[in-house]
Image: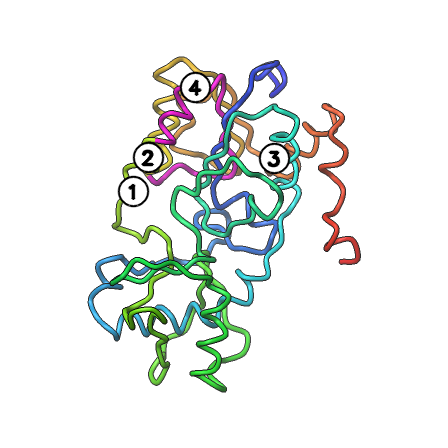
Amino acid sequence: MTIDEVLGDRRWLVLTGAGVSTDSGIPDYRGPGAPARTPMTGQQFRSGPAARQRYWARAYLGWTAMGTARPNTTHRVLAELERAGATSGLITQNVDGLHGAAGSTDVVDLHGRVDRVICLDCAETSDRADLQVRLAALNPGFGAEDLRVLPDGDVDLESTAGFVLAPCEGCGGALKPDVVFFGENVPPERVARCHALVDDAEALVVLGSSLHVFSGRRFVKRAHDRGVPIVIVNRGETRGDPWATLKLDSGCAQTLAAYAESRGLTRALSPLPDQASA
């Protein structure tokens, strides 16, 4: 059985995970060789300045990798499929914003976006790149060489003493990345939107997700309960495999590039304008 045989002329909903962004240089959470991960919880982040200092010092040094990552073949093919009317929506568990950068417009950022910052006091949102400039001015010379970048866009750094936090420019409150931390709940209105997309889907394609996290896995279960055809493309087993109509243990970029070529979507396989000389 092939993807074409499962999907046919159906419009399909896409659910993407960390494995989609590994070709852009962002580490995976659970793939082969993935670094050990002990993410900060939302409760820890809110516990006081010391925890927030630890988070922002590590995120400040990791922003170079996360902030400069560029869309890869998978992102570009999905954007082209949206333009061609082949997909009915895209839910991503990633916080890197690369689907939007590639041109996808119908995207639900399930866990938020790391390129945005929100104030815990006044709820005002602002740009993460602007915060990076402010942190650099407050912390001249802070940093170290050859630090390992982790999947959440921070680095493996033990000592964060002396790092100066930047407050909200509007009210002076504490700033937090506009993402769902481990232990936090996805906003209910966002979940409802995803449920609606699943209920309207003619098929579901899961790309680069082990589906270990309930926040994404529930949509696959919902699609299965509706009798919707499900294709899962991921290296290694996933917790959604028993529900899959077709499971492909292969790379997302390789699989989607072949699919795009079979559909004549060669534009999706060309470099983006700012990547032409890379």
Q: Is residue 35 left or right of residue 190?
A: right
Residue at the spot of label 4: 200
Nearest to viewer (mark 1 / mark 3): 1
Choose the circle earlier in sequence order: 1 or 4: 1
User: Does 202 sit above or below residue 27?
Assistant: above
Highlighted range, magenta: 193-213
User: Does 19 sit above or below residue 35?
Assistant: above
Tags 1 and 2 touching, CB below 8 Å: yes
**x then y, percent, for residue 158:** 37, 75
Distance of mark 2 from mark 3, alpha carbons? Answer: 22 Å
**x then y, percent, for residue 213:** 34, 40
Distance of mark 2 from mark 4, alpha carbons? Answer: 14 Å
Tags 3 and 4 touching, CB below 8 Å: no
Q: Quadrant of the C terminus?
A: bottom right
Residue at the spot of label 3: 78
Residue at (42, 34) in percent of width and height: 238
Classify mark 2: helix, strand or loop.
helix
